[in-house]
Image (cartoon, rainbow, N blue to C red):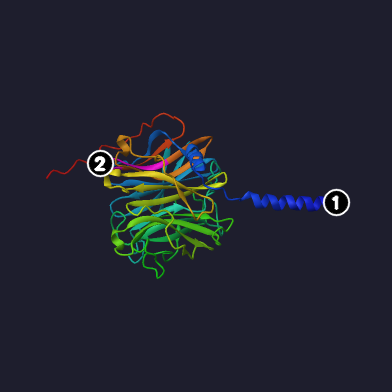
Amino acid sequence: MKIKYLILTISALAITSCATKYKKREITDSVMQEIYEEIKTPYKYGLVMVPTDNSYKMDCPSVFRKDGKWYMTYLIYDGRGYETWLAESDNLLDWKYLGKVMSFSENEKHWDVNQKAGYISLQDPTWGGSYEWEKYDDKYWMSYFGGDSKGYEAGVLSIGMAYTKEAPTKPHEFQRLENPVLTPKDKDARWWDNSTMYKNSVIRDKDKLTGHNFIMYYNARGDSINPAKGAERIAMAVSNDMKEWKRYGNKPLINHHKGISGDAYIQRINDTWVMFYFGAFWTGWNQGAFNRFAVSNDLVNWTDWKGDDLVKSSEPYDDMFAHKSFVVKHNGIVYHFYCAVNKAEQRGIAIATSKDLGKSKLNFVAPPEKKKN
């Protein structure tokens, strides 16, 4: 009887543990303040990646760790469109270029011939965790937005999926699914994504809070009356196999009704989900672009932070825009990677930190001369 009682007691404890492990935390003002204090980065280290000349611009860092080294995928815009590149670092501050992972197509019939803006999928989301790029179906996956028009985020952009079975730490071309997985022209396109689509970020829904295996957070422009003049908002889609995706819900997750809310990146801090994202032009063009966050206990309903920006323009190298977050915590220090744009419209990648690490010696090259009338 004692053994039977012991087994029942252990079983009961196990059930209780499982029941409380994923208990939803009420998102109160004090929780929001607690998260802010944990993630804030008041010290700007400065630029860590810059173009070697003014013929191209850098954008959208995604950082992961493998075998004791750090790696970054990022975008290069050269006047034709976006390609996705790879860099390497030992310390998160000093970076070395490695090569491309998604290039322009030679086949003009490809739907993404001139735009391939990629982002790592299925990364360990644990705050201060491994930051490993995890596999599914024995493949490393990237989601990306692509299109066939030339120019800066030009034409109709759609979302595609790419993958590789090779090490993601070596520059090589990822294979791509033949067709996009979400487009503004889909029959079930919503009023918020019926114009064009942008950055996408994919995580596992291990607890199936949505009833699916995977969640994609994406931002898109749209409007019920005039799609081309609509705002950008953050919404979500779901999948069970990384190939077939469908929109989820009947409204955007983050919506400021004007300007841009975009580039979601998800981390789990203790028992709470945090979405880093950027805002722009909510009160007009002069407001610029800046990094914010929102908090959730179910990955679907998000509470927006109402306090100070996490990162905003304050230095000569980011005095036009300071936006597009990728945030990691390592050895007790928070590193907030972002796209820095100056008033000469030069774009590079900068870092703000939670601890004063000094100042980067890296600068943009001399800005291009303005054309005289």
Give the residue drawn at x 47%, y 62%: 249
Q: Can residue 103 be spotted in the picture?
A: no
- Is disc 1 placed on a helix, strand or loop? helix
**Disc number placed over residue 3 in the picture, else none:** 1
| Residue 338, magenta (yes or no) | yes
Residue 90 in the image, given as x and y percentages of width and height: 48, 37
Name the quadrant containing residue 288.
top left
366 up-or-down from 171: above or below: above
Residue 156 in the image, given as x and y percentages of width and height: 32, 62
Give the residue type at disc 2. Answer: Ala
Residue positioned most to the bottom: 187
Give the residue drawn at x 35%, y 49%: 76
Residue 333 in the image, given as x and y percentages of width and height: 50, 35
Are the residues flagged by discs 2 and 1 in contact, CB closer than 8 Å? no
Q: CA distance from mark 2 to mark 1?
A: 75 Å
Residue positioned most to the right: 1
Q: Which residues are magenta?
A: 337-346
Question: Circle 2 sits on which residue?
Answer: 344
Give the residue type at disc 1. Answer: Ile
Q: Can residue 118 be spotted in the picture?
A: yes
Residue 211 in the image, given as x and y percentages of width and height: 56, 62
* Residue 203 appears left or right of 339: right
